[in-house]
Image (cartoon, helix red, strand yellow):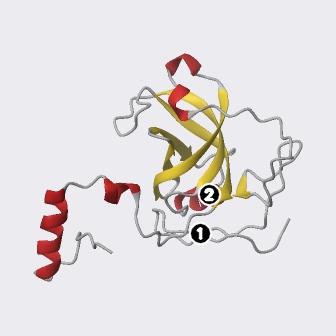
Amino acid sequence: EAGGGGGGGGGGGGEAAVVLGPVTYTGAEPEQLFGDLKLVQSNQKTGRVFTHVSKLDATLDGQEVWLRARVHNTRAKGNNCFVVLRTAGATVQGAMFKSDTVPKEMIKFAGALSKETVVDVKGLVVKADVKSCTQNDIEISVLRIYVISRADVGLPMQIDDAGRSEGEVVESERKLAAGEGDGAYVRV
């Protein structure tokens, strides 16, 4: 399905976002591996069963799972992308590496997702040592990623902002006042 449909958003990677037409997913898995879902309604039955991020662990190694989560962070460079997904306080790392099953366009799409965007992800649970997530004994090898709801790139407050100590904020304000704007946090 060609045509317009959601753009990118302030993720990592630095490359232009891939813009696709909307994806319809109400029966069998769509041909498209990634994109913005056309419409999500509570009366649609897709047959997908979602696993809560907090329930992911090494006992699921080798199993395919569906996750519905928020994008916590993205890091994309070249032919790979890492997406940290969050449900409530639990986080898991999703990994994509360019291959026959993961096209470069999918990596660009995922790398450009803005924080707090809600996504559906189908992936394979793989044992891994991940220090930056609550689910630190596995990662998700992403097979499909669909946007349910895009978050505005300029949200007034991010989760990271709420977690900063008063000392970090005071130091940042000092840097900003001294003209060292690089790395400074700005209070709104």
For the residue pair 184 and 15, the one nearer the viewer reads as 184
In the rendered view, would you say 164 is above or below 180? above
Q: Is residue 24 left or right of residue 16?
A: right
The x and y percentages for residue 50 are 68, 34
Task: Identify the secondary structure beneath mark 2.
Answer: helix
Residue placed furthest toward the top: 59
Q: Earlier in the sequence, mark 1 or mark 2?
A: 1
Q: Is residue 85 above or below residue 181?
A: above
Q: Is residue 53 above or below residue 178?
A: above
Are discs 1 and 2 less than 8 Å apart at CB?
A: no
State the residue at coordinates (86%, 46%). Answer: 44
What percent of the width, then of the height, locates residue 177? 13, 81
Q: Residue at x 40, y 30 (%)?
A: 136
Query: What number of labels is visible?
Result: 2
* Position of residue 153 in the picture relative to residue 65 (left or right): left
Residue that mark 1 sits on: 8
58 vs 79: above or below: above
Of badges 1 and 2, the one in the foreground is 1
Residue shown at 30%/52% (left/top)? 163
Pinpoint residue 93: horizontal percent, then vertical percent. Answer: 48, 40
Measuring from the top left, give residue 144's x and y in whole percent: 68, 45
> Residue drawn at (83%, 40%), measured in percent from left and top?
46
Residue flagged by tag 2: what amino acid is it?
A: Lys
Quarter of the figure with the C terminus: bottom left
Residue 178, quarter of the rendered image: bottom left
Kind of residue sitting beneath label 1 = Gly
Q: Which residue is mark 2?
A: 104
Q: Secondary structure at mark 1?
A: loop
In the picture, the quarter occupied by the N terminus is: bottom right
Q: Nearer the viewer, residue 169 or 21?
A: 169
**Residue 82 numbered tag:** none
